[in-house]
Image (cartoon, grey):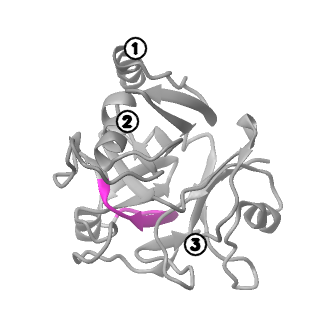
Amino acid sequence: MIRGLAALLAALFGIVAVPAGALECRDVVFEGQRYTTCEVDPAADDLRTFLTGGDGRTLGSFSTVEAAAGRPLLFAMNAGMYHADRAPVGLYVEDGREVRGIVTAEGPGNFGLLPNGVLCIGDGRARVIESRAFAADPPACRYATQSGPMLVIGGDLHPRFLPDSTSRYVRNGVGTSADGTRAVFAISAAPVTFWEFGRLFRDGLGLPDALYLDGSVSRLHAPSIGRSDRGVRMGPIVGVLGE
């Protein structure tokens, strides 16, 4: 039913629908803006976060992640904001180990523009959860990363977003279905506003919860469509490993 709704929304709003199944990346157009989306099935795809290698050093790039894993990296994206030393700003969990705790206080920059949120991956599901709700009743996450602001919260756009905003950046983020069985990552081809980016997830992709991952450092690795962005050392990374 959820995928059927997404397909209907796609037809109404002019976005190319992403079919059901395992990982698929494609270019789409929504309300005149171009994006690349990668849809992940958390039950079928090995979706996880990456930060450091066996030597404790920050991996920082898609090629380094792939080399450290010893398996092909089928999809990857920068996965949240980080400090100058590339340590995560907020909650970060890798393979069940909490590396950094959750931050629920309001603060400067996009991360502190509450509500912000957490991408929680575990038990064949992936969910975007508002940070204070997460802290009040922490779910079991094998992998998790915190970022902000939320783009969509329970079907509503972030209350601070303005339809006439002039703040435009290349942006990337992730949205999930209410039951956690569908996760879609997206990156814009050109600078967009938060309002436009939130509407992509809510009205174009039919997803009730979505999280902003970053802006000017946004990068995507999608070899199935011949793309692997370079040019900046990253902190947390989220991706899908192949066999």
What residue is shown with label 2?
A: 200
Left-right relation of 210 to 37 = left
User: Which of the 4 image quadrants contains residue 90?
Assistant: bottom left
Q: Earlier in the sequence, mark 3 or mark 1?
A: 1
Q: CA distance from mark 3 to mark 1?
A: 37 Å
Tag 2: residue type? Leu
Circle 3 residue = 235
Q: Position of residue 41 (x, y in %)?
A: 55, 38
Label 2: how many residues lie within 10 Å, few (<14), some (14-19) or many (20+)? many
Q: Position of residue 104 (x, y in %)?
A: 26, 74
| Amino acid type, callout 1 | Ala
Q: Secondary structure at mark 2?
A: helix
Say whether marks 3 and 1 touch (CB < 8 Å). Answer: no
- The structure residue drawn at horizontal position 30% and vertical position 55%, both measured from the top left corner, is 150
Q: Is residue 178 visible?
A: no
Q: Residue furthest front?
A: 166
In the image, is residue 144 part of the stretch drawn in magenta?
yes
| Left or right, 203 with reference to 99 | left
Q: Is residue 215 visible?
A: yes
Q: Provide the residue span drawn in magenta.
A: 139-150
Query: Is 134 placed above or below 222 here?
Result: below
SS label for mark 1 = helix
Is disc 1 in contact with disc 2, using a CB cutoff of under 8 Å? no
> Between disc 1 and disc 2, whose residue precedes?
1
Q: Secondary structure at mark 3?
A: loop
Q: CA distance from mark 3 to mark 2?
A: 25 Å
The residue where tag 1 is placed is 11
Give coordinates of residue 198: x percent, y percent: 32, 43
Q: Is residue 167 left or right of residue 62?
A: left
